[in-house]
Image (spheres, grey):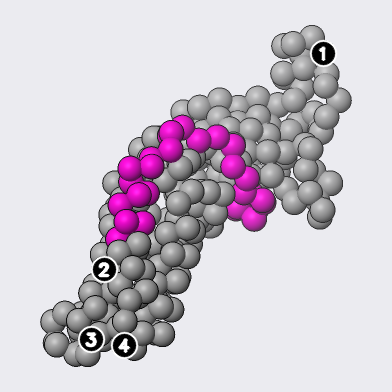
Amino acid sequence: MLDRWLSPEVLEWQALEASGSYPPRESLKSRSYEMLAHAEQLLSQPPSELSLADVITTLRRAIDRRVRDLNSVYSFRSIPFSDKPSDSLFLLESLGIIRSHMLQRLIDIRNAVEHEDVAPPGHETCKVFAEFTWYFLRSTDRMLENVPDSFYFRPDWDNDDNFETYMLTVDYGPENNWKPRLWGWIAAEMLSDGSVSEWICLKVEKIETRKEIAERRGYDDAVGKSNDLLIHAEVRGPASALAKITQAYFSVI
């Protein structure tokens, strides 16, 4: 395989979902909703300090269960870029999956209630946290319903004349052991034989020009330039590129 360097411009292209490989995982989804339903039932009754403490604890368990279920599918710790946060919530935030502020507030309140014998927040505040938990579960449901094994980058339809000419499909995700491979069409000037700072390091398995493919097939599809490149390659780095590819992957779910 050949070492080549790809322009990071491709990481600014639109990220669009290509395919997913997992069937729905209703059993994983349902347990967190059962916990949320228990908390909502408590909130529908006359409030007491004990019942509101139970609400806070149960909501925290519902979210913790969903985070663990997501990790069982995606194996977040296996994602290949350095300096990942050790805290699970901050890790999910770094991947663009969640925002951690409200979650952290709920965790802090639950810890104070459970470990320091602090009184729980009032009924209305607990209802806000229950609603937040519902939104958290709904926003992550799709991650358990469809787990992509590939996605693709394309130039922006509105702002780039090359939308129909260039595209890169990225095979990635837990089914691919979080080892990104890409293939597709790029302009010749987007690939360098020598190392370029901040460019994407590739191990190229195959590379052909449009002209070479046209000659081999015996016809020209009249798209793009004759020196455009069709590449098949493994992505090796740098860490910044792997991070952006990973964020793009989760953005299409």
Q: CA distance from mark 3 to mark 1?
A: 77 Å
Position of 137 compared to 219: left or right?
left
Q: Which mark is residue 219?
A: 1
Is tag 3's residue or tag 4's residue first in the polypeptide sequence? 3
Amino acid type of the residue tagged 4 in the rendering = Pro
Residue 103 placement (x, y as % from top left): 37, 73
Residue 121 has which mark? Answer: 4
For mark 3, what is the residue? 49
At mark 3, the secondary structure is helix
Single out the mark in the foreground, 3 or 4.
3
Q: Which mark is residue 74?
A: none
What span is in magenta? 8-35
Q: Quadrant of residue 188?
A: top right
Judge left or right: residue 61 versus residue 21. Answer: left
Name the N-terminal-most of marks 4 and 2.
2
Give the structural element (helix, strand or loop) at label 2.
helix
First of labels 3, 1 by sequence position? 3
Q: Which mark is residue 58?
A: 2
On the image, the x and y values in percent for residue 160 come to: 80, 50
